[in-house]
Image (cartoon, rainbow, N blue to C red):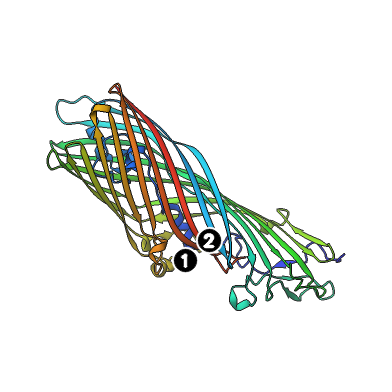
């Protein structure tokens, strides 16, 4: 057994006071890959800016609420299946994560007017999931210049506690398991009014909230017995990281809708810049095992291994516009959304030093959505399909990293007042994930499948 005092070992990879060191991706992650909600809209690829004639208008275009003439009660659920095919150092593995969540509930109530329209809506909706999973295992690179994590320890030698010993430089087995779960949601109060026979305007006042739970498990093993010389006869290093985050914000969404004829509608929208407050609680547990069976454990009893961190992120303007064309029983639509990711900012503390990297690492993007709906009145049904092209906000990446989605949908009207809508969305893209302890990175091929169901009752 190694006669090591409990406080001797120091893990050199902890370069900051916060174990989970923030980077620019922490800001992008909060607002990127918003799905939205509503089975009809998703079935049409989210190309809903110029349609928006149900409760989901509070998200897509609040001005669309002015088209609703009867009270509407809305309820929705969603099921997400996230699949990841991972390649790490030529070793291939697969992981899947699923979740079923209450998606939305809302009430729309038109106010009687002599002319035009005045409509209000109140409700809740989930518009973004944080679901992610990554599981890898493989033999790491050999040299420090080839992606080593530079895992080193001091205090290993009782006679020379200041000496540093490396657990890298030779091939080692690395295994990792990462999950991220949670969602962002909105509590909204919305209103819309006709300002002329063919023009409507609307707004949503939104209190945003949400949470996410990030779990990272890592093991490094000396399976090939490359580290046998005392005192650096390392056998295994294990680390578990847990990060629980809470999000809160207040924002405003504005919209307008133009009826150029019975057949053509144009919608415009804007989301005012907002500040999102992030509160994080982090915990790290780890232990180091030697060949002789001695084990040194580090846990929450070490004050540096637990803590709370808080910061604010300023989200830039989000502009959108769309066109809808009605051709008898066929409805075609498209929309485009613009955001300048270089305008993201950390607004508190030491993280503001990272703001200069947004210009060099990120870019402007245009998200494109296309959709169509075929109505068959004889069976009171609607069939829908759509496409989404969501560019990755990072610079200098291939198109393989852009997110592509194909959507399908179906709706049926029962007894002229009860609407049931279903949607299926299939997404696919590639990404590469790097970790402090696995800097070689994992090459990932991701598939996302989302099923949405909502019912609405108009009376």
Mark with earlier residue (2, 1): 2
In this image, 86 relative to 383: left or right? right
Q: Which residue is located at x 70 percent, y 60 percent?
A: 238
Q: Give the structural element (helix, strand or loop) at label 2.
A: loop
Describe residue 199's horizontal placement relative to residue 313 as left or right. left
The Cα–Cα distance between marks 2 and 1, rounded to whole angstroms, is 9 Å
Q: Which quadrant is the N terminus positioned in?
A: bottom right
Q: Which dot marks residue 116?
A: none
Across and down, in percent, residue 351 comes to 49, 62
Q: Is residue 169 left or right of residue 192?
A: right
Q: Which residue was labeled with disc 2?
A: 22
Q: Which residue is mark 1?
A: 354
| x, y percent for residue 55 | 32, 34
User: Of residues 403 and 205, which is closer to you in this image?
Assistant: 403
Q: Pointers 2 and 1 in contact (CB under 8 A)?
A: yes
Give x and y (percent) for residue 246. 52, 47
Q: Quadrant of the C terminus?
A: top left
Mark 1 surroundings: few (<14), some (14-19) or many (≥20) residues within 10 A: few
| x 36%, y 45%: residue | 407
Which residue lies at the image location 70% right of the left edge and 53% below the top edge? 300
């Amino acid at each position: 057994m190694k006669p090591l005092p409990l406080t001797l070992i120091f893990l050199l990879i902890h370069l900051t006071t916060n174990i989970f060191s923030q980077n620019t991706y922490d800001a992008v992650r909060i607002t990127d890959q918003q799905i939205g909600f509503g089975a009809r809209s998703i079935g049409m690829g989210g190309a809903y800016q110029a349609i928006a004639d149900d409760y989901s208008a509070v998200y897509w275009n609040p001005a669309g609420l002015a088209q609703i003439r009867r009270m509407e009660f809305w309820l929705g659920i969603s099921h997400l299946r996230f699949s990841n095919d991972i390649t790490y150092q030529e070793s291939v593995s697969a992981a899947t994560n699923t979740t079923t969540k209450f998606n939305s509930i809302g009430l729309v109530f038109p106010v009687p007017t002599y002319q035009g329209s005045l409509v209000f809506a109140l409700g809740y909706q989930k518009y973004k999931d944080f679901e992610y999973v990554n599981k890898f295992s493989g033999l790491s690179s050999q040299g420090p210049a080839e992606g080593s994590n530079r895992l080193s320890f001091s205090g290993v030698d009782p006679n020379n506690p200041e000496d540093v010993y490396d657990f890298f430089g030779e091939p080692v087995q690395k295994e990792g398991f990462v999950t991220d779960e949670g969602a962002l949601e909105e509590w909204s109060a919305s209103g819309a009014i006709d300002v002329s026979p063919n023009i409507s305007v609307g707004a949503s006042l939104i209190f945003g909230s949400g949470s996410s739970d990030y779990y990272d498990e890592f093991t490094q093993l000396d399976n090939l017995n490359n580290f046998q010389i005392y005192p650096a006869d390392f056998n295994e290093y294990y680390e578990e990281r847990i990060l629980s985050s809470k999000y809160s914000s207040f924002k405003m969404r504005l919209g307008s809708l133009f009826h150029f004829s019975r057949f053509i509608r144009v919608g415009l929208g804007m989301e005012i810049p907002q500040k999102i407050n992030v509160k994080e609680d982090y915990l790290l547990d780890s232990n180091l095992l030697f060949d002789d069976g001695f084990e040194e454990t580090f846990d929450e009893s070490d004050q540096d291994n637990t803590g709370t961190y808080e910061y604010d992120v300023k989200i830039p303007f989000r502009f959108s516009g769309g066109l809808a064309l009605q051709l008898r029983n066929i409805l075609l639509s498209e929309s485009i959304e613009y955001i300048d990711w270089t305008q993201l900012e950390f607004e508190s503390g030491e993280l503001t030093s990272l703001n200069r990297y947004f210009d060099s690492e990120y870019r402007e993007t245009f998200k494109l959505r296309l959709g169509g709906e075929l109505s068959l009145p004889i069976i009171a049904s609607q069939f829908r399909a759509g496409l989404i092209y969501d560019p990755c906000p990072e610079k200098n990446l291939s198109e393989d990293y852009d997110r592509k989605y194909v959507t399908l949908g179906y709706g049926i009207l029962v007894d002229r007042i009860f609407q049931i809508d279903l949607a299926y969305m299939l997404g696919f893209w590639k990404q590469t994930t790097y970790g402090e302890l696995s800097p070689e990175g994992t090459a990932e091929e991701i598939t996302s499948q989302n099923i949405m169901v909502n019912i609405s009752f108009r009376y």
